[in-house]
Image (cartoon, grey):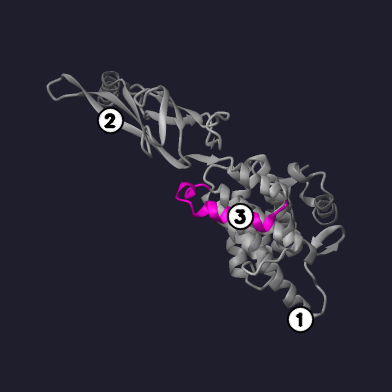
Amino acid sequence: MKNTVLFRLTLALSLLFITGVSFGQKPTLSLKSTKRILTLDDEEDGPSNNKVKLEASFTAAGTKKVGTEYTITGVEGKDWEIISGELKSDMVELKFKKVGNFSVTVTTTYSVKKKLKNGETEEEESDVSVEEENYITVTNNLDELTQIHADSNFVKLVKKASDFIAKPKYAGDPTPTIFLAKGYFGMYRKDLKDPLIQEPFDEAITATASAIEMDQNGIFYTPVHKMWLNAFQNEVLDNGIIFKLEESEGYPVFYSGKDANKKVTLTEELLEGIDQYSQITKNPLAAKFLEAAIRSQAKDMKTAGLIWKIEIPNLLKLEKLDKFTEADKKALKVGILLSVQILPIIEKNNTNSCALLNKIKPWFENDKDFIAMYENKFKSCKPE
């Protein structure tokens, strides 16, 4: 028996030595870029923000690297051109010339020594690839729309942005749609009228949702657009949800009065508000706990329970809120403060409520609503 085990171990080590591949390891490939959003300037001789370096990193894990090759959507020379390096090198620098989203695939070929039946070895080649759809977004400054927005000429902005959206050149660019949303929201805020635009607030929701869906690489995270998005989100969140809640011992609660008609009306308005907010956030988790609490208030316990079941683990895995707007953070906080009032009744314990509160404590420990909830209702949740 011992001889058999020794023989198998010796054979395994021999194969490991022959192939040169570490047991349990496989070669890996990763892709990095210096930027994901590039800007074409309106002027030919303007600042160059349309260059990007792509770098492939291959971990051999005992194999032998043979070669690397990039594939980029679009037409070389027309949509983009090589500035340095080449498509068959680990690093290549590109200059993009056309607005749109561009996908990138990088493939590394490697070889492994394979033992033949006659005792000889041969090199067997294989590939590992990274495919990134819409990896690079190329947009335009659109200085004309920026100036119209700065002039607060919102009706004109809606019409001009619509013209840009209709151009094939901007088919993959969310920027004109962002300006369209800004125009609609400005009309709503200033109560501007136009016979062709009946509901500018609803149009702003729709345009923002469309821009978010198109925004593959975070144009909305650029400061000027993020600031506007936060303002719009706050408008929807405050008017559609926060101002329809009441307060108890310093933290938000649902209306609990005896007026049944008022309760029904408020619940319908809250459902409409969370539906609108959910459309205009790039961070769906921010609105999920609010939605679950509101669904519970509407007696839709099946949907509420499903949301909590899915999103509690997601929140507990979340490490930071760096991509959240201030409105997103507020929506998350209020949603959790409402949820932890309901979960103990459903679950007959405070386990999930305590886990949620302790998770968000580092983010909201100086917030008066959070402190009030912790001190007045969940002191027992504090870690010893």
Tell me the quarter of the image containing the N terminus. Answer: top left
User: In this rendering, would 365 be left or right of 198?
Assistant: right
At numbered mark 2, what does the secondary structure look like: helix, strand or loop? strand
**Image: 33 above or below 320:** above
**Residue 226: where, in percent of width, then height?**
67, 45
Q: Nearer the viewer, residue 40 or 18?
A: 40
Residue 126's tag is 2
Instruction: Say whether disc 1 or disc 2 marks the residue closer to the N-terminus.
Output: 2
Residue that appears at 71% across and 57% down: 186
Secondary structure mostly seen in the magenta stretch? helix
Q: Nearer the viewer, residue 108 or 172?
A: 172
**Residue 101: where, in percent of width, then height?**
46, 43
Instruction: Say whether disc 1 or disc 3 marks the residue closer to the N-terminus.
Output: 3
**Residue 159: where, in percent of width, then height?**
60, 57
Say which amino acid is labelled 1: Asn
Instruction: Say whether disc 3 or disc 2 marks the residue closer to the N-terminus.
Output: 2
User: In this rendering, would 340 be left or right of 102?
Assistant: right
Residue 180's tag is 3
Tell me the quarter of the image containing the C terminus. Answer: top right
**Residue 195: where, in percent of width, then height?**
65, 70
Residue that appears at 67% across and 63% down: 201
The residue that mark 1 highlights is 261
Magenta residues, start to end: 152-173
